[in-house]
Amino acid sequence: MKKVLSLLVAVVFVASAAGVAFSAPAQKRTSSKAKAEKVETSTFKPFAIYLENASKDNHYAPSGWMGDFGDLKLNQACTETPRSGNTCIKITYSAKMTQGAGWTGIFWQQPANNWGEKKGGYDLTGATKLTFWARGANGGEKIAEFKVGGITGEYPDSDSSAIGPIELTKEWQKYTIDLTGKDLSHIIGGFCFAASKDDNPNGFIIYIDDVIFE
């Protein structure tokens, strides 16, 4: 196994509509309680979102495309100098404002396309952080936010945590989202990034690898 991974707000984004706003109004949270798939053990073991393309140890799906989703290309089998192993994630952002939003992002969700309207997610109780590696093709790429959780709806994420803004370098750098003290009993939005045209007028190419709850 490989080595153990604000413009965006903690709300559900409607990625299927052409006019998605950067700060979508929060949906009313209900008292419905979802039961997430249990991951916790007596000692929390690393739980990966991405290790290698098509790895059986990967969890969550990069299905929650937001904002100018038409400006994005995603390659989960990129072989351009991965951090470790044979592949990494490559994200290309054109900044053409295809949907007129001026920003974009992707949520890794469980199950796919779950914006809190159905049961799912994982119980990650025991995890204290999410770590991941990232780099830019040229350096200077600006990411508004990397995030865990924050999806609302009838079955919302139980908590959220984020880091950002972050300016990437050309070299792989390790980043950590602190989850200490967070309620991780129901997390359907395992990982997310958001970036804007204002910060990246010419778009960007970025790479992500080894996204792991620890």
Image (spheres, grey):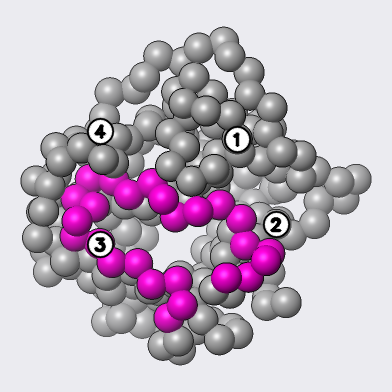
Q: Residue at x 71, y 38 (%)?
A: 37
Q: Nearer the viewer, residue 77 or 91?
A: 77
> For the residue labelled by badge 4, is the local secondary structure a helix, a strand or a loop?
loop
Q: Residue at x 43, y 81 (%)?
A: 78
Q: Is residue 156 left or right of residue 146?
A: right
Q: Is residue 126 left or right of residue 119?
A: right
Camera-nearest label, 4 or 1: 1
**Which quadrant is home to the N terminus?**
bottom right
- The CA distance from mark 3 to mark 4 is 19 Å
Circle 2 residue: 47
Image coords of residue 23 (percent x, y): 25, 33
Image coords of residue 28 (percent x, y): 40, 14
Q: Is residue 88 left or right of residue 158?
A: left
Amino acid type of the residue that numbered disc 3 sits on in the rendered structure:
Leu
Circle 3 residue: 72
Amino acid type of the residue that numbered disc 1 sits on in the rendered structure:
Gly
Circle 4 residues within 10 Å: few <14, some 14–19, many ≥20:
some
Q: Which mark is residue 120?
A: 1
> For the residue labelled by badge 1, is the local secondary structure a helix, a strand or a loop?
loop
Q: Is residue 151 left or right of residue 142?
A: right
Give the farthest residue toward the right.
42
Q: Quadrant of residue 167?
A: bottom left
- The CA distance from mark 2 to mark 3 is 27 Å
- The CA distance from mark 2 to mark 4 is 30 Å
- The CA distance from mark 3 to mark 1 is 26 Å
Q: Quadrant of residue 151?
A: top left
Which segment is the magenta one?
A: 54-78
Q: Quadrant of residue 169?
A: bottom left
In the depicted structure, whether residue 68 falls above or below residue 172: above
Q: Nearer the viewer, residue 69 or 83?
A: 69
Image coords of residue 184 (percent x, y): 66, 36
Circle 4 residue: 23
